[in-house]
Amino acid sequence: MICNHGVAGSSPAAGTNKIKGLREIAQPFFFQKRRKVQFRYSWGTIPAYKQHDTDAMATFVKTKSDTWKALVRKQGWPTVSKTFRIKRDAMDWARSTEDEMVRGTFILRTQSERITFSKAINRYLAEISPTKKPQTQKSEQVSARHLTSFFGKYSLAAISSELVAAYRDKRIADGLANNTIRIELALLSHLYTTAIREWGMGLTVNPVSNIRKPSPGAGRNRRLAIHEQEKLLAAVDAHSNPMLGWIVRIAIETGMRQSEITGIRCSQVDLERRLARLADTKNNTSRIVPLTRAATDVFKIAIANPTRPAETDLVFFGEPGRDGKRRPYEFKKAWGDIKKNLGIEDLRFHDLRHEAVSRLVEAGLSDQEVASISGHKSMQMLRRYTHLRAEDLVEKLDRISDRQ
């Protein structure tokens, strides 16, 4: 405080004039464009100063737990608050928040800072996953378990690109396939996209978008040998449920996906015209699959199955669930046991689709004709599923040489 007591050896009036001169000099540096406000504490108020060029109001309250709570109020913006251990951190945060509000760049991050990854992924599985296909839902549930074991206790705001890269490296070190890791990262990325666009979580960056993804890989090149097919068909025919044998034969003959086969209904199969109409496919587009004579014969037997209950139209039906509804026949365990007994554990059911598509190409069908049967949208994807036998190409080369 400056006291107006005068200066030794001079008159009181002279001392007053000098003080006024000091105030005029100090005014531009300390008091210009400033007004007094009150910072409220739990035990009283302490005066402070605030700039006139912003109408934001910062209030600091010391809590009973000996922490500092900062509140920022500004017209046109939501009131925001945050608690800190020391007063200086609270003041720095309040100043930064006020500056962002003035510049119009402030984003409310409270939700993303409070919600854990575990809660966020559970919300995703409850709200977003049900809009996807059943097979995708199952895959996302498996991926979510692995992601939760690593990120579960972090808040969404705390997960950085460095942390996501550490997860990627850990999964690679664990020996997971590249495509598996890519699927898990895709789920994590879509979670953040949903949180930003639809949930208003106050996130500005998707941490997955800034990291390197594992390469997709060269793809599988597993063909079903003739002797393997003979053993496989004999084994599935001997299974207690004849539907397993019918499903495997239809896969080899038509190249249909597993979900397309097990989900097909009697009303979708035209035995007279030898056509199968698929309404619900992986690509979300319907298509009509022409049936070979062998496939038509299998469908005739399957549709005439005397054990089919009257309440279901599924060609390949399972036992009723807890809700009393019958769903498509599940044969994962039986398929695995048969492969193990035959010593062909590296064979996947999807490889039967590869085999069927490759045989269509080897039979002389054009790429467009094969794509119309298999349902591939692009020729690039079709080529990934088409693997010609080298020995068949040798025979064709020999026929060309013979003509010459």
Image (tube, rainbow, N blue to C red):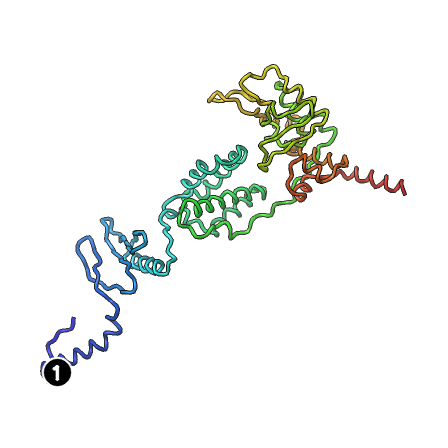
Structural crowding at the residue carrying mark 1, measured as other residues with C-alpha within 10 Å and reported as few (<14), some (14–19) or many (≥20): few
Is the N terminus in the top left, top right, bottom left or bottom right quadrant?
bottom left
Give the camera-side residue of 216 and 108: 108
Q: Exactly how many numbered labels are in the figure?
A: 1
User: Which residue of the protein is positioned furthest toward the top in this rendering?
Assistant: 306
Res 379 → quadrant: top right
Give the camera-side residue of 151 and 365: 365
In percent of width and height, residue 125 lies at 46, 37
Q: Which residue is mark 1?
A: 14
Under mark 1, the amino acid is Ala
Look at the picture and state if 86 lies above or below 122: below
Can residue 81 be seen at all in this image of the molecule?
Answer: no
Q: What secondary structure is marked by label 1?
A: helix
User: Which residue of the protein is positioned furthest toward the left in this rendering?
Assistant: 11
In percent of width and height, residue 195 lies at 43, 45
Q: What residue is drawn where x is 25% and y is 71%?
A: 32
User: Which residue of the protein is positioned furthest toward the bottom in this rendering?
Assistant: 9
Look at the picture and state if 309 lies above or below 258: above
Look at the picture and state if 139 lies above or below 98: above
Q: What residue is drawn where x is 21% and y is 56%?
A: 40
Seen in the image, is 11 located left or right of residue 404?
Answer: left
Can residue 204 be seen at all in this image of the molecule?
Answer: yes
Seen in the image, is 33 located left or right of residue 206?
Answer: left
Is the C terminus in the top left, top right, bottom left or bottom right quadrant?
top right
User: Which residue of the protein is positioned furthest toward the front in this rendering?
Assistant: 273
Q: What residue is drawn where x is 74% and y is 39%?
A: 366
In percent of width and height, residue 71 lies at 28, 54
Res 39 → quadrant: bottom left
In percent of width and height, residue 175 lies at 57, 42
Res 339 → quadrant: top right
